Image (tube, rainbow, N blue to C red):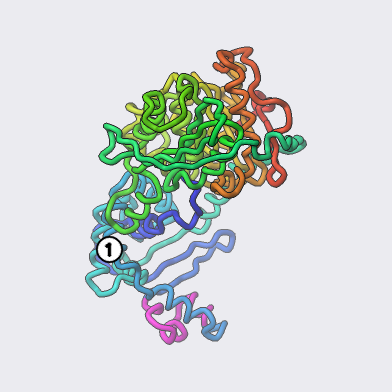
Amino acid sequence: MTQAAPSRIPVTLALAAAIAVPPPVLALEQIELKLPLLDTTFTIRLAELRDPRSLLAGASDLAEFDQATQGAIGQRMVELFNTPLPLQALDVARQVVPSPLAQQALLLLSSLGGVDGLPAEVSSDTVLQVLDRAAGQGALTMLGVLQAIPGHTATVDVGKGLFLLQRMNGQLRAATQLLEGETPATVDPALAGPGALAVRRDTLNLPVTYRPLPLEVVVIRPSQQASGRLVAISHGLWDGPESFEGWGRHLASHGYTVLLPRHPGSDRTQQQAMLSGKVPPPGPAELRLRPLDISALIDAAAAGQLGLPPGVNTGSVVVLGQSWGATTALQLAGARPSSQQLKQRCNDVRDPQRNLSWVLQCSFLDAIDQAALADPRVKAVVAVSPPMALLFDAETSPVFRGRVLLVSGSRDWVVPPGPEAIAPMARIARQAKQGHRLVLAGGGDHFNLGSPYDQGGGPLRGLLLCWVNGAFAAGPGVAPGVGAPALLPPDGWGDGVLSLTDVSGRLPSWNP
């Protein structure tokens, strides 16, 4: 998942889900929306969507609604369904639909309904056949695609849609309950304010053996008087270093040298190429390649390849990450991905913990057994909104070599706090007090916890600086274990906009 705006999530995945049906035998004529409580259906006849006059003269429920409003909605509905889709839509579908990422999206969305008399299994070949059939009739439009679907009536169960929404709200409610009655951390200007050091920003390219092209790396560090302490930041899906350079700038102003790689297989450039139909979505191999990117940067810093001042300590590093980048940080800290839960739970669309991040997690199955890539130089991490519930063994819980601060937003519907943060951390807390912490950001979502370079570090700046300071100050004591010294003091690392609360002490009694 990503720091990028929600609108950047490819519409093609949802479009493909709507047409995931077996080979054509009939042309779809109508759509029925099953309405809960009223025990009735709302019909839409596709032939009436060709022009406003057809809809105004039609006999479907949508036509009657249009007539009752004297054609107020007809013009817009017809325009929506008849506007040509982007020219590259078919190329995009050919790249996206067969991917594991898209197959999980299709599985979730196809649970909302189907086409009468036909199997509900998703077939990528059939999706492409439908699109080819629609494209053969002229300009590719939403109406044309719908009419190329086999069968007579497509049913969308609104009640099942409400079930999905209620499940999502329940997964957010878990954080709200933990925050009730808790006092957020206050703001210490020494942590929230910029440091005294001037900062410089550089970009360089680092050749690596496991990728065809060099890694682009943003280096943010003090212009002078650097502490020699090294931090790396990993970005999320379809994002880039630019969304987290504010974190780096804040840390650099306090003496830290910060490295931000652009993961080329899952960054914004890859997304743009995918939406142009040139490449498929990120493959499962990226689960392994991303930690390798961070380790390669540490290697390069140790070898003097990044132009850093002498004295940088590469034997003790802190890694920060958001979304998929947070999962990367957890891998480097020692969490071993496992196929166990992916095989058991990925196809269960009614699993109470299922959430949007499972679309990404379940796409990793083919590479999961090669993704244990702990780096002993990574002594502590901050994982902001990590997709993690399925990736690590539920019975044994992640075994971390590095100390972990997990941060989750109370309004994060992409990686919701209930199943993806609270439940995993509760399992760890039940086993032993290892020194890991969970901080909930009241009002935080999946997109508002980062910071561009010019925005001062964002709402987590004090928390990040405090944890990084504590990790380096602890020396050998930074290792997790019973009785490990606290890296996070009781107060001072809060924010003036979002409430930040350490709920770690409430987790042993939590019943997920």
In the figure, residue 22 lies in which quadrant? bottom left
Q: Residue at x 25, y 39 (%)?
A: 212
Label 1 residue SS: helix
Q: Residues within 10 Å of mark 1 (few under 14, many from 20)?
A: many
Residue 61 in the magenta stretch? The answer is: yes
Residue 103 spot, x, y in % from top left: 34, 47
Above/below status of 294 relative to 247: above
Residue 222 spot, x, y in % from top left: 54, 35
Residue farthest to the front, as pictured: 224
Q: Is residue 400 visible?
A: no
The magenta-colored residue range is: 47-66
Asked whether 304 or 39 is in front, the reply is 304
Residue at image mark 1: 131
Q: Main secondary structure of the magenta part?
A: helix
Q: Residue at x 53, y 26 (%)?
A: 229
Residue 116 in the magenta stretch? The answer is: no
Asked whether 259 or 237 is in front, the reply is 259
Q: Is residue 294 visible?
A: yes
Would residue 69 be found to the left or right of residue 275 on screen? Answer: right
Residue 356 spot, x, y in % from top left: 48, 46
Residue 260 spot, x, y in % from top left: 45, 38
Question: Which amino acid type is shown beneath numbered disc 1?
Answer: Leu
Q: How many marks?
A: 1
Q: Residue at x 45, y 22 (%)?
A: 314
In the figure, residue 441 lies in which quadrant? top right
Above/below status of 227 relative to 202: above
Above/below status of 57 relative to 131: below
Q: Quadrant of the C terminus?
A: top right
Q: Residue at x 27, y 68 (%)?
A: 134
